[in-house]
Image (spheres, coloured by chain):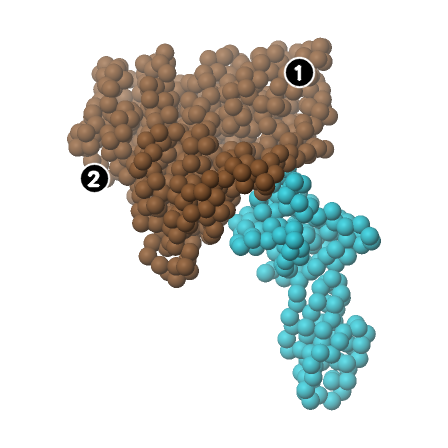
Amino acid sequence: MAPRSTSDSRTLAIVVDNEPGVLARVVGMFSARGYNIESLTVAETDRAAHTSRITVVTGGEPGIIDQIKAQLERILSVRQVIDVTLDPAGVVRELALIKVRSTGQDRIEALRVSDIFRAKVIDTTLESFIFEVTGSSDKIDAIIELMRPIGLVEVSRTGVLSIHRGAETDKIITSDAAKPAATSL
Amino acid sequence: MTVTATITSIHSPDAAAQAAVEMTGAEMVIRALEDHGVDTLFGYPGGAVLPIYDALFSHDALRHILVRHEQGAGHAAEGYARSTGKVGVALVTSGPGATNIVTPLADALLDSIPMVVISGQVPTHLIGTDAFQECDTIGITRSCTKHNWLVSDVNDLAAILHEAFHVAKSGRPGPVVVDIPKDVQFARGAYYPPTHASRRSKRTVRTLDTNAIARAVELMANARRPVFYTGGGVINAGPRASAALRELVRETGFPITSTLMGLGAYPASDPQWLGMLGMHGSWEANHAMHDCDLMICVGARFDDRVTGRLDAFSPNSKKIHIDIDPSSINKNVPVDVPVIADAGEALQALVAAWRARGKRGQDTKDWWKRIEGWRARQCFAYEQSGDVIKPQYAIERLYAATRDRDVYITTEVGQHQMWAAQYFHFEEPNRWMTSGGLGTMGYGLPAALGVQAAHPNALVIDIAGEASVQMTMQEMSTAVQHNLPIKIFILNNEWMGMVRQWQQLLHGERYSHSYSHALPDFVKMAEAFGCVGIRAERPDELDAKIKQMIETPAPVLFDCRVAREENCFPMIPSGKAHNEMILAGDGAAGAIDDAGKKLV
């Protein structure tokens, strides 16, 4: 994965058939055509509808993003591609586990920083903490930078998740009958 | 914006259950092929596919053509598909059987050829154990198919087979793979006919964007320097697309050029035809593309062999792009009016809208005057003198000798392919089978077998080079076994000619490994295979020998000895624009700069 860029980052939620190999189809398209994946999250989201949701953070000029979306829609297993970045009501969150090893004043400062970010302590020893924090990618980046000089030793991040704000849904196509045209191409 | 509607299956699961018949997985494969109207398949048996071959044993209605290498099966299926408009089918075993057909899959994907490949796989319980002749067929073929399926349950097999045929031929056609483990072939389960199978990928109807059609017609009516640029998509869209294209071109009076893949959609004998465009296209076609003020692209994809230097590609034109695949729009070249549609449907709508508009377009007389000026350069001129056959002359004589016949042409890849495209002329679609996108040497001979199998009484000629033909020449044995009287017309210059040409132009005449050393005696080789071998060495004997070839009712290998160091012109040097192309008389040395050398 390339270093995360912020300016031209785009988050795409890709609703796919939950079947073996589907992640390879999606990720393989990105690598085969030279598109970047900054982060990737995938899990089954609707057992009844047999769908999984893959959230990809990628980047590029608007023309490249259009091309990525069109190429994704050619994949038979892809039911829908939602451009979260373009959605004013789109909410994105990421979760990180952050291990900090320190003693004395740094240990107190780490707790103080975690408090500001509303992080949870989920494990502690006499010389370490593990914090759990959620938020936008920028917020996660910020806490990591603040923890770095006070004993940060390890980070694990989920990558981005997204959903549409309000009572409306993303109108995810769940029935076979309503597959978009592009998938038959 | 295009509106999308979806047709749902009219059959309920109950109806499907009623129509179900119990049989083995292997029998289902045969039944599905029959239900989809398949009359011919190309294949090679092996351990993991034996149950299907066993089921085939008692089905005489399905013609199986045994090839000599699975690559041959794939290209034959492509030739069959390209010349009929139907889906080509190949049957191969696991492991090496599957890997050997990867090249045809990649070829069919780039050229949008509908093909269903059925591969055997090791039994389910052995998958992942590095079993004998096991490979990850799904993983290996994922990026060279439209879609692929590993069938893990015999009760899914019918639906998957029906979906495979649907996916292969719908939208932008392409190849698919159905990988069937041996135990699934033996297992018994329920088979449903295609009409009763529930499909996951739906048949969708894309409503034509009438606004886009209206905008396109306005642009056409106001264009002073228009040109049609058409491609393989017109041929894939079937005869009605070619018919609509002819109507539209004639009614507008605009000039038309086409890609390598699109040859035959518009008759080459028509005065509005400018010849092929692109790297080895005609002077007039490429200059028209560069200087036009409106480009109407139908079923072509602006690939690098067509555009030349992208930032200098047709700089002053508006562009209309009709394509069935939304990902083709704005991929390489930004366009002004995209129309996502089947080429035939869009062309018919354009014809109707053009007629409805009544008022004819701008006067294109000045434009045609310029085109006539480019034509006057006679970019395909060459000199046939002395005792040596020029390759261009050989193709011209072949064309002259066959033009009144029911003829189909396939090619290998290289100089001979470009000369065939330049000097053999096509009046109808589906008559020209060539590997355009992937550039697969070895394509033409097996493709010709597929064409001949589909058109037993036609004259099928593989225009070949002596290097390409050696890649798949074992299929001559297939031709003999199955009475497929193909003609393999080798332009033998003893070089990998296009490689030699590039080494001459780009690499200081250092001919690294491009000479065809140790060539077989092609006439003796033909005889060893049970074919007829003919050799022509002098221009004055060419016509008689071509006549002899045509009249031989058996496979013929024609060793046409041609000038050894002839180059293929005109040529847009790598990294140059359409209007920087060079002709045979121009000094070609130094034509390609350092940036161009890095391109393919």
Q: Residue at x 74, y 68 (%)?
A: A134
Q: Colour of chain B?
A: brown
Judging depth in this view, the residue of B383 and A14 nearest the camera is: A14
Query: Within 10 angstroms of label 2, few (less than 14), some, or many (20 or more) residues?
Result: few
- Which chain is mark 2 on? B
Secondary element at image label 2? loop
x and y percentages locating residue B493 in the rendered image: 28, 30
Q: Quadrant of the N terminus of chain B?
A: top right
Location of mark 1 (residue): B352
Q: Residue at x 39, y 34 (%)?
A: B77
Q: Residue at x 70, y 28 (%)?
A: B209
Location of mark 2 (residue): B518
Judging depth in this view, the residue of B121 and B32 nearest the camera is: B32
Type of amino acid under label 1:
Ala
Type of amino acid under label 2:
Ala
Determine whether label 2 and label 1 are within 8 Å by CB.
Answer: no
